[in-house]
Image (spheres, rainbow, N blue to C red):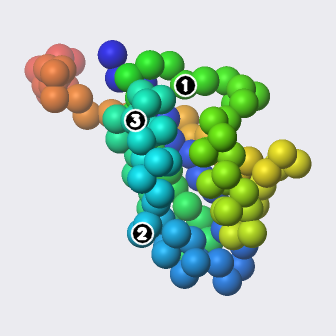
Amino acid sequence: MTFRRAWTMRLRAGAEAAYDAAHAAVWPELQAQMRADGIRRFVLYRDGTTVFAYQERQRPFPDRAAPASEITARWWREMAALMETDAEGRPLQTMLREIFALRPDQETENRETAR
């Protein structure tokens, strides 16, 4: 089963180029940690200082209060100067509600004939 979610985060003004550069060179050990955590896909998009994140996992998402791995916590410390964070240094996230998904394994209902 695939679990997915999306959220937004905010960069500090003027941090866009540094944020992009950091993500052009994500540490191999961080990528390995994400894979070990069951992350199958993780995509970031940016519009100005707004970052949109989408993630798919092979198992349920951990509770936000769960401690991060050491490598993830180190990455967050590096990113803290670039983005809005909570008191523990975790990036502030606004979770998004999924309202539509086109799935290749579902039949499409013909709404014209279903009326």
Whether residue 63 is situated above or below residue 87 in the rendered picture: above
Residue 104: % across, % down: 16, 29
- Disc 3 or 1, which lies upstream in sequence? 3
Label 3 – label 1 distance at C-alpha: 13 Å
The residue type indicated by label 1 comes to Phe
- Disc 2 or 3, which lies upstream in sequence? 2
Element class at badge 3: helix
Residue 111: % across, % down: 19, 25
- The tag on residue 61 is 1
The residue type indicated by label 2 comes to Ala
Where residue 79 sits, quadrant-wise, is bottom right
Label 1 – label 2 distance at C-alpha: 25 Å
Residue 77: % across, % down: 72, 57
Q: Quadrant of the N terminus?
A: top left
Q: Name the mark nearer the viewer: 1 or 2.
A: 2
Q: How dense is the environment of label 2, judged by Cα within 10 Å: few (below 14), some, or many (20 and up)? A: few
- Disc 1 or 2, which lies upstream in sequence? 2
Element class at badge 1: loop
Q: How dense is the environment of label 3, judged by Cα within 10 Å: few (below 14), some, or many (20 and up)? A: some
Residue 113: % across, % down: 11, 20
Q: Can residue 94 be seen?
A: no
Whether residue 54 is situated above or below residue 19 in the rendered picture: above
Q: Residue at x 54, y 35 (%)?
A: 97
- The tag on residue 48 is none
Label 2 – label 3 distance at C-alpha: 18 Å
Which residue lies under the disc numbered 3?
35
Q: Residue at x 43, y 30 (%)?
A: 36
Q: Name the mark nearer the viewer: 3 or 1.
A: 3
Where residue 50 sits, quadrant-wise, is bottom right
